[in-house]
Image (cartoon, rainbow, N blue to C red):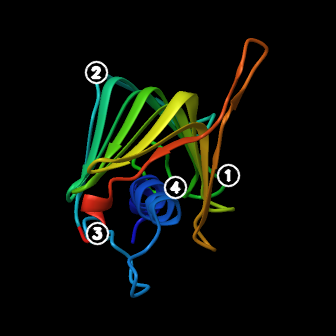
Amino acid sequence: MSRFSKVLAGIGVACLAFGASVVFGAAQDGSSRLTGIKLSGDEPIQIESDRLEVHDKDRQAIFTGNVSVVQGKTLLKSGRMIVYYSDGEGSVATGSSDIERLEVDGKVYVKSESQVATGDRGTFDMKTEVLVLTGDEVVLTEGDNIIVGCKLTVQMKSGKARFDGCENAQNKRRIIMQIDPKNRDN
């Protein structure tokens, strides 16, 4: 699997599969109810944006304006995506350099077959394999099941996910979760 495939898989699978399985739970027999998320490392990745700037010296590629990343049935949309490349060999311009981290912002939207996650900003660190989705309202849905908070943190190595409420000078909001029992066997 290429480094960029891991990033997309990190955002799509981590945010949706790990986050939703922790949040929405598992079926009574212990198996995961989330069957819609499947990414294949050999599937091509298509990236579209209004603009691409490559800063080889700074080891960055910046996609801006209606950014859309598709791999298989997973879709990531945002206003901007910055790919930070690690120091070392390889060219940023050709994508042959290793990715260190990825940052997305501007109405982040991640969709798979059955789950959708939205927020204002997202980061994925390749070394620690930690995904963080933040915003005034981070929403994770699967059918009629919904969880809302301000920060979703997923540790991909362990599969642990944590949803945090909102806390700022004006107010404090707690996590809101709605589970529809009719969707339990889906």
Foreground mark, 3 or 2? 3
Q: Is residue 110 left or right of residue 25?
A: left
> What's the residue type where badge 2 is placed?
Asp
Q: Distance between the residues labelled 3 and 1?
A: 31 Å
Q: Mark 2 points at which residue?
A: 50
Q: Distance between the residues labelled 1 and 4?
A: 8 Å
Q: How far apart are marks 2 and 1 (CA)?
A: 27 Å
Quarter of the image for residue 89 reads bottom right
Category of crowding for the residue at label 3, using alpha-carbon neighbours closer than 10 angstroms: few (below 14), some (14–19), many (at least 20): some
Foreground mark, 2 or 1? 2
Q: Mark 4 points at which residue?
A: 97
Q: Where is residue 87 in the image (x, y as percent from the top left)?
A: 67, 51
Please state which of residues 40 and 174 is positioned toward the viewer in this rendering.
174
Q: Where is residue 20 in the image (x, y as percent from the top left)?
A: 44, 59
Q: How far apart are marks 4 and 3 (CA)?
A: 26 Å
Q: Position of residue 69 (x, y in %)?
A: 30, 43
Q: Determine whether 63 is above or below 132 in the image.
A: above
Q: Mark 1 points at which residue?
A: 87
- Pointer 2 and pointer 1: residues touching (CB < 8 Å)? no
Q: Name the residue under label 3.
A: 38
